[in-house]
Image (cartoon, grey):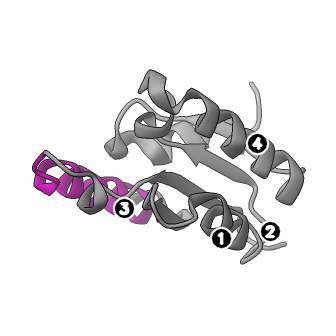
Amino acid sequence: MAEPRVLVVGLDPAEIEGWDPAPVQAAIARGRARFDELGLAADWCLVDLDADPEGTIAAALGHADYACVVIGGGVRKHEPLLEFFEKVINLVRRHAPGAAIAFDRTPEDCADAALRWLSPAP
């Protein structure tokens, strides 16, 4: 049986104007390290909102059979992105219908969010 694979979908902090991406990039690096610590396979799809983000996400969803898709807070929490968030949910439903959908609190806890859905229920 193949190891479960996770896709993390979020905004590319380097593509957001008007703020320093370094702290978010550092948090993403810690989040990636957490996947490694837990032995979980993960791909990251960080999108630029000005460069066909829906197409980028749809293509990423087609790269593997994902057991879980974690949608980052940058997509979910910023009210002007509500319509985009809806599109992301529907892209996951369409392109990875068997995948659980999880939400992180920060880029650092993406793996833990995925584990909520990858671990068998008690």
Identify which residue, 111 or 11, lies in the foreground: 11
Q: Which residue is mark 3?
A: 32
Structural distance between the alpha carbons of marks 2 and 1: 10 Å
**Label 2 secondary element:** loop
Pointer 2 and pointer 3: residues touching (CB < 8 Å)?
Answer: no
* Horizontal side, residue 47 vs residue 29: left or right: right
Task: Looking at the image, tell me whether mark 1 or mark 4 is earlier in sequence order.
Answer: 1
Q: Is residue 21 magenta?
A: yes
Residue at the spot of label 1: 60
Q: Does label 4 or label 3 sit earlier along the sequence?
A: 3
Residue furthest front as drawn: 50
Q: Residues within 10 Å of mark 3 (few under 14, many from 20)?
A: many
Mark on residue 100?
A: 4
- Mark 4, other Cα within 10 Å: few <14 / some 14–19 / many ≥20: some
From the image, tell me which residue sits under label 2. 65
Image position of 5 (left or right of 43): right
- Tell me whether the residue at label 2 lies in contact with that at label 4, contact meaning CB atoms closer than 8 angstroms: no
Amino acid marked by disc 4: Ala
Looking at the image, tell me whether mark 3 or mark 1 is earlier in sequence order: 3
**Viewport quadrant of the C terminus:** top right
Q: Mark 2 against mark 1, which lies toward the viewer?
A: 1
Label 2 crowd bin: few (<14), some (14–19), many (20+), radius 10 Å: some
Q: Position of residue 71 (x, y in %)?
A: 56, 42
- Tell me, yes or no, whether the two marked residues, 4 and 3, touch with CB atoms within 8 Å: no
Q: Main secondary structure of the magenta part?
A: helix
Q: Quadrant of the N terminus?
A: bottom right
**In whole angstroms, how far apart are the C-alphas of marks 3 and 1?**
17 Å
- At a point 61% along the width and 68% down the height, the residue shown is 56
Find numbered disc 1 in the image and state the secondary structure of the residue it sits on. Answer: helix
